[in-house]
Image (cartoon, rainbow, N blue to C red):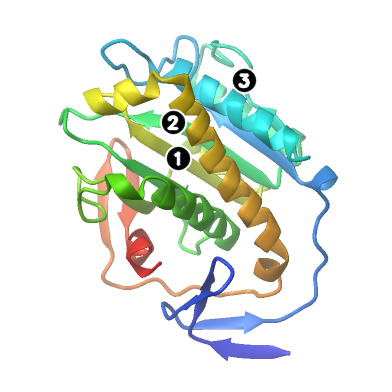
Amino acid sequence: MKKTATHWLLGTASVLTLFGASIEIQAKQHISKDNFSIVIDPGHGGVFSGCQGSKTQESVLVLDIAQRLTELLHKKGFKATLTRQQEKELDPDLMTDLHKRIEFTEQNNAQVFISIHLNSSSNKQARGYEVYVPYNEKLSYLSYELAIQIHHALAHAIEQEWTGTLGNLNSIDRGIREAKFTVLTQEQCPACILIELDYLTNKKSEKLLQDPGYRQKLAGIIQEGIVTYYNLLPAIQNRTPHYQKKTNVVRKEKKGHYEQESAFSDLYSLY
């Protein structure tokens, strides 16, 4: 049975009118946790330390958050593995290091890939989180659904700290975006995202990230989003949307890749 609709399902009950979509309803079984492989990628590592705070470095903090997240997922019965287990690069060549993360994901037949990062800026006031999906002319809808659930969990967990409008450099919630990050150029894993949890160059954010309890909280928030995505997967897979992006998209080149801010970036205002 084919049904034409102009709505989008977020969470368990919210219906939003965003795009014209042709939705095909078909029965699919829920994949078991034993077959639902999750790969968590702590960004950088070793000689590729990532961004620097005044007292901390990205690669060390994201490894700690990733380890905490993996442990929480194991307690929930999920099969979760890390691309790196220690503070060391996967290869001394940067591009080889990145491609080894993709190869690891493929070897584990992952259903979900999440790369965890921290951001930096010359503007020391910049702070906030953003979730990236692969840049593609035809959006990977499973990556987008995963991004929605994790973005939703992040947004609700730090609601009391909202200080600006979505996408503003000084705001907390910087939205869901697309980017051509190498680790997101995967063809076999159906749901790939990259999370920038906060700005290490912001003193307040760095102080929070130095607290093990706060890092545990971040791990728990991401876990919540993953679990929600897993629970919703049968409903998600029972429809096949065909996205039509808005034509008035702002596209800008930044550091050798395209970062696209589009209708997807202001989803939070619709929750």
**Relative to 266, 67 lies left or right:** right
Q: Mark 2 highlights which residue?
A: 117
**Residue kind at label 1, given as amino acid type:** Ile
Gap between marks 2 and 3 measured at Cα: 14 Å
Which residue shows up at 52% across the image and 28% down it?
216
| N-terminal-most mark, 1 or 3 | 3
Gap between marks 1 and 3 measured at Cα: 17 Å
**Residue kind at label 3, given as amino acid type:** Arg
In this view, 224 is above or below 13: above
| N-terminal-most mark, 2 or 3 | 3
In this view, 164 is above or below 102: below
- The location of residue 260, given as percent across then percent down, is 33, 54
Which residue shows up at 66% across the image and 35% down it?
39
Which residue shows up at 49% across the image and 73% down it?
243
Q: Residues within 10 Å of mark 2 (few under 14, many from 20)?
A: many
| N-terminal-most mark, 2 or 1 | 2
**Residue kind at label 2, given as amino acid type:** His
Q: Mark 1 highlights which residue?
A: 195
- The location of residue 222, given as percent across then percent down, is 54, 41
- Disc tally is 3
Element at label 3? loop
Residue 265 visible, this orientation: yes
**Relative to 212, 247 lies left or right:** left
Q: Are marks 2 and 1 in contact (CB under 8 Å)?
A: yes
Q: Mark 3 highlights which residue?
A: 84
